[in-house]
Amino acid sequence: MRKYFKIFKTSMKNTYIYPIDAISMNFIMIAVVIIKLFLWKAIYINQGATIGGYSIIETMWYVIIADIVGFAALRNIARTLSEDVKDGSIAYKLVKPYNYIFYLISITLGKKIITLLLTIITGVLMAALLVGALKSFTLISIAVGVFTIIMGIILQLIICLCIGMIAFWFEEVSAFLTIYMRTEFVIGGGFMPLIMFPEKIYNLIKYLPFSYITFKPLDLFIKFDINKAINIFKIQAIYIMIFSIIGFFIYRKGVGKLNVYGG
Amino acid sequence: MFTVVSDNLKIIFLNMKYTIKTKMTFKLNFFLTILGQGFNALGFVFLWYFLAYRMQILGKNGKEELMLLQAVSGLHYLFLYLFFADVGSLAREIINGSIDKYLVRPKSVLFSIISGTNISLIGNGIVGILTFFVFIKISFKNVFLFLFLSFLGSIMALSLKIIMGSLVLYVKGLRSISSTYSGVIDTLLMYPEAMYKGIGKIMVYTIFPAAFITYIPVKLILEFDKMLLFKMITVVIVTFVFAVVFFYRGLKNYESGNLM
């Protein structure tokens, strides 16, 4: 465990040589949140008190936390894996005394951690100041909500790893990653609560793994219910298991057929 | 003057031609990249399509306006990234002191640095064009305005990126401002103007002038107004000239990184 922490720390130090970069990412987040607040305010003006059971305050909290989750995502893990395959550096990384997948996770997390912390602080402050606290918030609802959000991020990480492993066959995975990211954003609830889609579409997409990454955890965070929490947690665990097994087989097959050129 | 312009255009077109030829060497990757970005743009069209019926604030042309916004935004990306994809790295090139190789060329320094092609944005362009043809009433006037105004929008976006990239020639600490500013503008482009009131509206016409990239083109296609077109052309030309002058003035402060 200690070696992964060292990898994480080194990656963090290398990334944040220019701290201003991390801060500037935060400005984008602030701007995005403000633009979205304008949008939802405009939508609610003519739509009455609730849309899909969400009041304007609940929707704004949802949108802000969805943005934080979006920033927290470790999707770049797929690109790092693909780069390692392309430049051949995977050959010596595979024989080093660490697990390559845990190495990838540590390095990606190290690159992200400070931006992520800043994003969480900024997002929560913006939500509290611009929107105000939600009445439904309790210590338990926040703790369980955050837990399912983390489970969602883990599920997303495993799916991204599976996509990254396509690099063993295609080398370039950007297109697959872009398609996945947009699908997850649109039908996973990255932009708005899925319940706001027309009913037929909502019924079609609500059980897909994408909705257990963003929509379901956030819906739980906003509208807490312990039975709902248990149900979400169970399905998240099942999806995590399914994608871990898929990833395991892809990895074994991919590493087996890996050809690296050069010395 | 004419020779200078034609020389620069030649560089830009040659750059694009050879980038596409190189990328075409790996045909599958080439098409997958375009497909990926096209899908990305399609995702937004899908989202806005469903949001349109909730946005009564836009009035009776709401759906057309939102779809046209996506169409113009997609095509402006195509123009911008087909010819000037490297404008995004202007600030980095300056900070690294690596533009010496362009300084010794007998061609325009600025256009040598910024000309480049990013093929993935072809996907955005294709989705933009398809969105236009599916959702907007087709007429010669509409098609012409769509092409011309998207092109003007791309010149405006280019000018803003040049200004932001050149800022580091004046103040070195502004390393990240270029990408941050572009990030904000890119987000603003896709949201309808009608949702902004008061200070928000003033900002999209001044500090973050996304209005001149997508909002005004959309307005003009839906309801043509000669005066508004004239104002838009004037603002785009003035901003472009200012951007070029701003870069060359700042270039006097450039410090080489001796990377040649």
Image: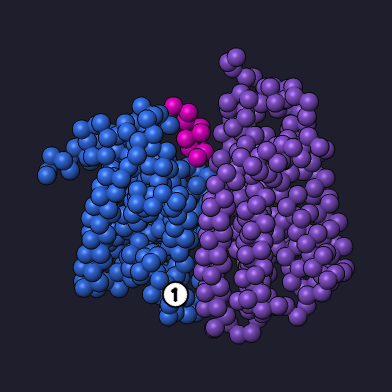
Chain colours: A purple, B blue
Name the magenta segment's main secondary structure. helix
- Judge from the rendering whether residue B16 lies leftward or rightward of residue B46; answer left or right: left
- Of B192 and A96, the residue lying toward us: A96
Q: Position of residue A97 (x, y in %)?
A: 78, 25
Is residue B26 within the magenta segment? yes
Label 1 crowd (10 A; few <14 / some 14-19 / many >=20): some
Is residue B151 within the magenta segment? no
- Judge from the rendering whether residue A236 lies leftward or rightward of residue B21; answer left or right: right
Q: Quick one: SS at disc 1?
A: helix
Q: Position of residue A22 (x, y in %)?
A: 57, 52
On the image, numbered disc 1 is attached to which residue? B200
Quadrant housing the C terminus of chain A: top right
Q: Which residues are magenta?
A: B25-33
| Most distant residue in the top direction | A263
Above or below: residue B116 compared with residue B148: above
- Of B35 and A64, the residue lying toward us: A64
The amino acid type, in three-letter code, at marker 1 is: Gly
Q: Position of residue A78 (x, y in %)?
A: 64, 39
